[in-house]
Image (cartoon, coloured by chain):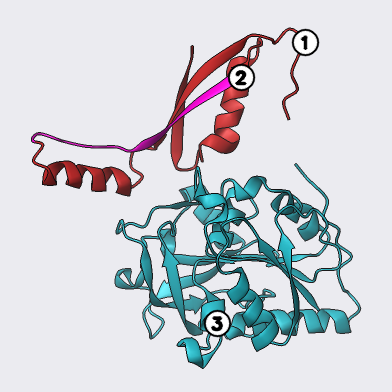
Chain colours: A red, B cyan
Amino acid sequence: METETAQSTQVRSVRIIVMLKPGVLDAPGQAIQQGLDALGHRGVRGVRAGKYFEVELTDDARLDERVRRMCEGFLANTLIEEYRFDVL
Amino acid sequence: MDIGIVVFPGSNCDADTLHAVRDVMGMRAQFVWHEERELTGLDAVILPGGFAYGDYLRAGAIAATSPVVRALGGYVDGGGLVLGICNGFQVLLEAGLLPGAMRRNASGQFRCEFVSVRAERVDTPFTCALAAGQVLRLPIAHAEGNYYADAAMRAALAADRQIAFRYCDPSGGVVPGANPNGSTDAIAGLANPSGSVVGLMPHPERASEGLVGGEDGRLVFESLARWIGARHHAGRAPTATGVEVR
């Protein structure tokens, strides 16, 4: 588990998006698209549903690596999902 | 013999499973709280169906971080037996005790119905009372049972005989129309290579008495009773301790 290092007092905000990999059936996305169609929204060519996380965590030189480990080990199931993130 | 049935916040088949194992089968059984780390003395641990931790993040993902599930690796290494039913199967996948992942059902629907499954592997503690190719009629009730494995994993599953059950038609034919959720290779249940860990999407505990529409599920628990009985007879009762492994 992560231990806080002495200099890591600054807190950063990380925005993480997890999406199903292309080609993996996105049943929620399809259902949402059907809903938009039913409501008469024209021209909707595709909807993909995913997950969005905002994680506040203490900063250090390995911030990106820490976030990647969170994503690969827990926030995303990398067999069927992919992730991307921004550090604010 | 002592069977531990894990209770997560959000489990909803724990009492049904206890009833099937204890009242119907006559085995000694107890609930095991999800914060438990000590599994010593249990002949088998069953992860029941339900919605552990509300299925937040992904079905089974939060449960996989719980103390009891993190103790399962050490428990299995020490000779322990583990069965995951429905949500319990999802937990085993998320915990890495069985390979692969669950997607939403291809139909987009929660499927709640009786299905037929064919026994593919009958040398495990949970299937040893079955004949190879035997068809069981069992109920499913899930939205995320669409099993996924990539090509390399599928090859490994075949090589290690890890497919325990396949969805089939009532006569045992594995045909597209009999697959209720779109699972890769019609997989309804998996085993680890040694067979000590088994997960399946159908609910054997919901088909253990004629009163509730079927008795085929009883064979899963009968297998377990037979296996443990033979093991005790041979003096190889588990000394497994639940060691936290991650």
The amino acid pointed to by label 3 is: Gly
Residue B232, position as x, y percentages in the image: 86, 80
Measured in 3D between alpha carbons, the distance from the residue under mark 3 to the one under mark 1, in whole angstroms, is 56 Å
Evaluate whether residue B103 shows in this view. yes
For disc 3, the marked residue is B217
Q: Are marks 3 and 1 in contact (CB under 8 Å)?
A: no
Q: Is residue B124 left or right of residue B143?
A: right
| Segment colored magenta | A42-56
For disc 1, the marked residue is A6
Q: Is residue B189 left or right of residue B27?
A: left
Q: Is residue B137 left or right of residue A69?
A: left
On whether disc 2 and disc 1 are found on a single subunit, the reply is: yes
For disc 2, the marked residue is A57
Characterize the local packing of mark 2: few (<14), some (14-19) or many (20 or more) Cα atoms within 10 angstroms. Answer: some
Query: Is residue B100 magenta-colored?
Result: no
The amino acid pointed to by label 1 is: Ala
B159, B135: nearer the viewer:
B135
| The N terminus of chain B, quarter of image | bottom right
A51, B15: nearer the viewer:
B15
Q: Return the chain for callout 2.
A: A
Q: Earlier in the sequence, mark 2 or mark 1?
A: 1
| The C terminus of chain B, quarter of image | top right
Q: Return the chain for callout 1.
A: A
On whether disc 2 and disc 3 are found on a single subunit, the reply is: no
Residue B143, position as x, y percentages in the image: 40, 59
Evaluate whether residue B193 shows in this view. no
Looking at the rendered structure, the secondary structure element under dot 2 is: strand
Looking at the rendered structure, the secondary structure element under dot 3 is: loop
Judged from this view, the residue extending furthest toward the right is B235
Residue B80 appears in which quarter of the rendering?
bottom right
